[in-house]
Amino acid sequence: MKLSVLSAAAFTAAVFAIAPTAPSAARPVVCAECVKANMELLAGDALRGRGCGTEDEHAAARYIADALKASKIGAAFRPDVYLQPVELLTPTAARPATLEIASGATSLSFIQGRDILAMEPPESLAAPIVRVADAHPAPEAVKGKVVIYDSAVFDQPGIQALLRAGAAAVISPVSDQITQHWSELAARPPGQTEVSGVPSASRPARGAIIFAKPETMAALRAVSEGEARLAAPRGEPRRRTTYNVMGVLHGKAADADRHALLLTAHYDHLGVRSGVIFHGANDDASGTAAVLEFARILGSGARHRRTVYFGLFGCEEEGELGAQYVQAHLPMAIGDLMANLEFEMIGVDDAKHPGALMLTGWERTTLGPALQAHGARVGPDAYPEQHFFQRSDNYQLALRGVIAQTVSAAPLPATYHAPTDDLAHVDLAFMDAVISSMVGPVTWLLDSDFQPEWLPGQKP
Ligand SMILES: [Zn+2]
């Protein structure tokens, strides 16, 4: 799961209803040893946290391709070609960004990572400053200015409102979540990675967001007018290659390929940082192991009516980069996808909905309730304020009309993006149980005529 810097840290309670489990027909059983072996390999020391674009990530991709082949899943791209290379070009910082404030006799200087976090800062910016305590001043008061948003707490809607009003940049207090992930965010490149072969999204020009540590905010309270200069010089861009892996099991119906199900997960994680391996056992070795287990089960049984693809994508953690590429270079026509189910972080049970999974965008389509009615231990997204529907690989496909939703257990456990996200903190028995509960519903979907649909007004 990609870290969002603009999500409220406070979670609200959500109603989470699990339907009684439908009587289960005889169905293939999850192989606990297979799931465990895949988890041990993917989240083990040897693959060093599968960092985006590293040889470790590439080794994971080859392992996944071999596993699909061993499960009698064909290659999706070309005969025997399971891997899809993706070339990446990432901007780098020549030196940490600086923010200088000149106000009368006062001059303040702040450094990226030490005092501030400028998110994707422009290379340079100079503008008058204005300090506001409320997020809805007259637009002319903030337009083109660097706005010091002196709110008592982190206020995401307020920041967005100021940016919409035309602020060149908004300096804001941090949230607890940002504080917790400060060094990860400070290490981020100063701009979006370009995925070669994917037209860069023409994002509307928007002001920069600069998070300020409490000490920085305190210093800024001495300032009410003057000028701000932000400098974020770029170095040579960094070139890397990631790989998507995709296999296919064609259905037996004449029109099997026209109603295909796509099961996906991302197999990359954060790699090694300051000598520490971030194993990413829950995020997202667990989802990858789930998709591989579906491949093993579906590849070993009788053929189904509909076609099913198994996609494992690279470099999700740096902005869904692998998914961006594969979605622009799909091995099938996009209109032939009946649905995409993404498996993201299913290795840690959540107190809000114990023993079960949640489906992001539950209220948007007819898919979740249908899976639940067929026995899946899955229910609504228990964290709607986190906007998880928009935060994983499924979203780009959803934007193009495909019913694409993410299945998750605890989307933000204590181990989230921490070195403790390792095998010792994953509940394999829970994983086996929830994967097992999905086998029947997925098999039903592959053998049925059911066509999931967007509910009125719910298509993103
Ligand atoms: Zn993640």
Image (spheres, rainbow, N blue to C red):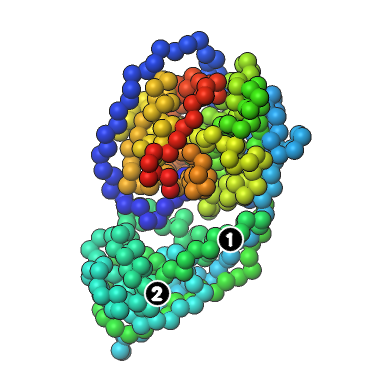
Disc 1 is placed on an element classified as loop
92 vs 382, left or right, is right
Q: Which residue is mark 1?
A: 200
Q: Residue at x 47, y 11 (%)?
A: 25
| Quadrant housing residue 200 | bottom right
Residue 284 at what x, y percent from top left? Answer: 51, 38
417, 453: nearer the viewer: 453
Question: Is residue 198 something one can see in this rendering?
Answer: yes
Q: Secondary structure at mark 2?
A: loop
Determine whether the beta carbon of the residue marked 2 sits less than 8 angstroms from the nearest atom of ligand 1.
no
On the image, the x and y values in percent for residue 430 come to 43, 25
Mark 1: amino acid: Ser
Query: In the shown orientation, is residue 109 left or right of residue 266?
Result: left
Mark 1 nearby-residue class (10 Å; few <14, some 14–19, many ≥20): few
Q: CA distance from mark 2 to mark 1?
A: 22 Å
Residue located at (39% from left, 33% from top): 358
Disc number lying in front (2 or 1): 1
> Label 2, on which residue?
168
* Identity of the residue drawn at 43% across and 39% down: 454
Q: Earlier in the sequence, mark 2 or mark 1?
A: 2
Q: Tell me residue 123's x, y (percent).
A: 52, 74
Instruction: Name the foreground residue: 189 vs 180.
Output: 189
Res. 280 visible in picture? no
